[in-house]
Structure formats: C-alpha cells, structure tokens
Image (cartoon, rainbow, N blue to C red):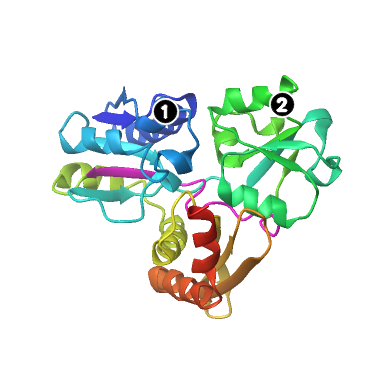
Amino acid sequence: MRLGTRASKLATTQSGWVADRLREAHGVEVELVEISTYGDRSSAPLAQIGGTGVFVAAVREAVLDGTVDFAVHSLKDLPTGAAEGLTLAAVPVREDPRDVLIARDGLTLGELPRGARVGTGSPRRVSQLNALGLGIEIAELRGNVDTRIGKVTGGELDAIVLARAGLLRLGRADEATEVLDPLQMLPAPGQGALACECRADDDATTALLSVLDDPDTRAAVTAERTLLATLEAGCSAPVGALADVVWGDDGDELWLRAVVGDLSGNPVIRRSASGAPTEAAALGRRLAEELLAEGADQLMGSVTTS
C-alpha cells in the first residue's frame, strides 16, 4: 500500500505509526510517499495563505489521482467540508490534545516576566494568551518543531506554545516546561488526532483502514469539527474546542467545551454542553448556535477583516 504524507519529520512519524499499525493488523507492506504541500513551501502566516487546507490539498490530489492509496493527515489541518471523492476511513485513537509551553530557564507561563516574547502562529493561541492578562508580547512563529524550539534555545524568544501531541510522537515531550490546562488554553478542533483518508469508491482500502478507527475519538472530533463548521470558521478565527467522552449517570456522555475570541483576548465567549456520543454532530451544532447567539460571529469577523 502507498501512504501519502507530508515530508516533515512529524508528518512522517505520524504516518509511520499508522503504517506500523496496518502491518500489525493485516500483515501488509506500507510504503510512505512524501508529498510537498503549499503550506510547507510558504513561510507566510497561515491566515494570509488561506489557512484551511494548505497542508492537505496536494496530498488529497495524490489520493484522488491514484498516486497513493490513502493519506494520513493531522486532523486539525483538514477543512471541515466534505471532500468529493474521498472518505474519512479511520480516526485512530487520539494523542494528548493539549498545548504546551517551552520556555527558557524552565519557566512556566505564570513565571514569564512582563514583556516576555512568546511565539505562536495561531490566532486561537494569541487570543487565549492575551485573555490571561499576563502582559506578554506575542511574536509570529512558523516552521517545523526543530525551528520553533530553536527560537527559544537560541535566545530569540522567551517561550513558544505548540501542541503536546507532536512532541509526544517525536519523543520530545520532556522538552515542554508546562502542559497548559484547557481552562487556560483550549486546543484547536481535532488537535492531537489523525485522519486516514482514501478514495470513497475504494472499498478494499476503506475496510483495511477501518480497524484503526477509535469510536470515542471520532465522536469527540466530530463534535469539535461540526462546531467549527457551523461557526463557518477556519484557521484565521480564534476558536478553541475540546470534546471528551466521560462516564455519566446514564453511561457514556460527550462533553464539549468551546471558546471564541478576538486577538486582543477581550472579550471572549466560553460555553460548554453535553450529549450522547452518538449525537456528536448535533451537539457541535447546538453549542455553535449558542456561541453565535452570544455574538461569536462578530468577534470572529473582527479578526478576519482586520
């Protein structure tokens, strides 16, 4: 089987993990095929180059034209709309979705001095960091994990914020100086999850990939991504969301939290809701509609038009 992947160290590590699971489950050989995407080639801020889809379009094209049999993406990079001719065959068990801080001298977020320079390329993180009122300065940041961490070790930045899942997959989790509580920093919808995508008419590959699907993870990310789609938001909108399957009074419950803000961090709208895991999409729509009723569209509009 030919697996399409971005060429970054993190992408190939994630894809290699999926390939190993398929070898174990089916005894099939899997070849990684590296594909260059527009998002990898551009150094401009994501909001300027289109954000949503810039890391997956070329890989998806390779699946559709038969260059590869299937692809592995970071789920948060996938547009929320359906892709014609493709199916999301599996969402494997999710890695830790939280964000982490990597700071000089082992500092935590609360220990950073006023005026400290913190790097991130995410409007979602900018909004939530500013909402904490710590008096830090936000610096634009792009690049792979090595490049980002190098900004701290080289003294250019005091700290950076990035996803813990990537560090865990790369075996570098101990480099984080703090794991950020979702009460402070809700992750991006789908963060920490992988997406295995193949052609919709390829029943054989769909069946092979289905063994990797984790129902709890799929329910959680379905709620998060439906919320994002209902808000009509993308990478340029400061939206955080996290869903968890928890044990409730009547069995499994899906608990969804979300935040919408502007880049200043003031104001922000935070809401939560719960429902059955089997009704994940409905839960996401309901919470998004509550956020819109509170003025979420105005907050997002102030960012995307600025």
Q: Is residue 15 above or below residue 181?
A: above
In the picture provided, is 296 more to the left or to the right than 229? right
Residue 189 magenta-highlighted: yes
Q: Which sits in the foreground, 114 or 161?
A: 114
**Which residue is the site of mark 2?**
152
State whether the magenta stretch is mostly helix, strand or loop: loop
Q: Residue at x 57, y 39 (%)?
A: 121
Q: Which sits in the foreground, 36 or 7?
A: 36
**Which residue is the site of mark 1?**
40
Q: Is residue 253 above or below residue 262?
A: below
Helix or strand or loop: what does disc 1 sit on? helix
Q: Which sits in the foreground, 199 or 123?
A: 123
Pinpoint residue 78: horizontal percent, then vertical percent.
37, 47
Pinpoint residue 126: horizontal percent, then vertical percent.
64, 48
Pinpoint residue 94: horizontal percent, then vertical percent.
49, 48
First in sequence: mark 2 vs mark 1: 1
Helix or strand or loop: what does disc 2 sit on? helix
Q: Give the residues in magenta.
A: 182-198
Q: Number of labelled discs?
A: 2
Q: Is residue 26 visible?
A: no
Q: Residue at x 38, y 49 (%)?
A: 91
